[in-house]
Structure formats: structure tokens, C-alpha cells
Amino acid sequence: MATWHKIYIYNEQIEQWDNQAIIEMPSDNEFAGYFFLLPKKMVFTISTNFSYFYFPDNWKFQLKKHTEKTQIDVVKMIALFQKDNDKIMQTFQTKKVNNSIISVRTHIPKKMEKDVSIANDLIR
């Protein structure tokens, strides 16, 4: 049975076309300017700025740029999107509840540096 992977991306990298989604590759790697197609049902929008796409571990990505074509595997695809994926995951997480996606904002609270005293009657 195939393992499925999820990659978070920016909405600017996606364009809907018929029953497919056109996804642009990140601009900070050797495949800048390339794009690939995924079925629309494998791409989900979770906010006005972010989306994600799913794919199985045996998927082969057909990258295109004008008349150039190349193929990469899942491991390479995950590595290429790793930087953006990690950045988005730090600021935005999703949960699936009752077959609907709920967005949850996360943040790291500020460290509190205050002296705390515990009343003796509260200690067991």
C-alpha cells in the first residue's frame, strides 16, 4: 500500500486549469521556472495564502518548462519544497474534523520570567 505525502505551498504557485492544477516549482533551486500538473482533487486550499497537495510515494513528477521536460521522483520533490514547506508549517497547521479542513493558527508564546511562589496549603 502506498504512503501519501503532503507538501504545503503558497497559493501564488498554483493555477487551476480544467480538472488539473498547475503548480510552479520553487524559485530557489535548479528547477526554477518549471511546473507540473496534478489532478485538482489532489490539491487543497486552506487559506487565502496557503494550499497543500498530496501524492503517493510511487508518483513520478513530469516537470515542464517551455519545450523542456524532465522527470523527478518523490524524494527529490520533497527536498525541493522542504524550505517553503517548513516555513509554512511553522505558521499554519490544519486539522481534519468530520471530513472538513479546519485551519488553526499557531504561535510560540513569549517566555515568562517571573518568580512564582506556591502557597503551602496547595502542596500535597
Image (tube, helix red, strand yellow):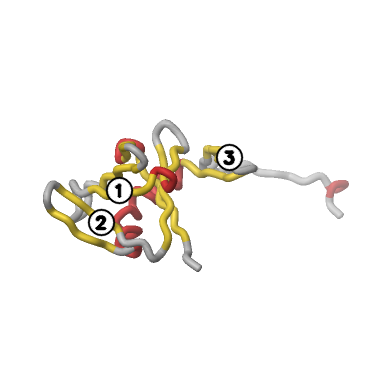
Q: Earlier in the sequence, mark 2 or mark 1?
A: 1
**Residue at the front extreme of this rendering:** 18
On screen, residue 92 versus residue 61, left or right, reads right
x and y percentages locating residue 121 in the rendered image: 88, 46
Q: Secondary structure at mark 1?
A: strand
109 lies above or below 4: above
Q: Earlier in the sequence, mark 3 or mark 1?
A: 1
- Residue beneath disc 2: 62
* Residue at 81% in and 44% down: 119
Q: Nearer the viewer, mark 3 or mark 1?
A: 1
Q: Nearer the viewer, residue 93 or 110?
A: 93
**Residue at the bottom extreme of this rendering:** 1
Q: Amino acid at mark 2?
A: Gln
**Residue at the left extreme of this rendering:** 67
* Residue at 38% in and 47% down: 39
Within 10 Å of the Cα at label 3, are there few (<14), some (14-19), or many (20+) other Cα atoms? few
* Residue at 35% in and 55% down: 82
Q: Count the marks.
A: 3
- As measured in the structure, the alpha-carbon distance from the residue carrying label 2 to the one carrying label 3 is 30 Å
x and y percentages locating residue 122 in the rendered image: 84, 47
Tell me whether the residue at label 3 lies in contact with that at label 1, contact meaning CB atoms closer than 8 angstroms: no
* Residue at 31% in and 64% down: 73
- Quarter of the picture containing the C terminus is bottom right
- Residue beneath disc 3: 100
Within 10 Å of the Cα at label 1, are there few (<14), some (14-19), or many (20+) other Cα atoms? some
Tell me whether the residue at label 2 lies in contact with that at label 1, contact meaning CB atoms closer than 8 angstroms: yes
Q: Earlier in the sequence, mark 2 or mark 3?
A: 2
- As measured in the structure, the alpha-carbon distance from the residue carrying label 2 to the one carrying label 1 is 8 Å
- Residue beneath disc 1: 37
Q: Secondary structure at mark 3?
A: strand
- Label ID, residue 13: none
- As measured in the structure, the alpha-carbon distance from the residue carrying label 3 to the one carrying label 1 is 24 Å
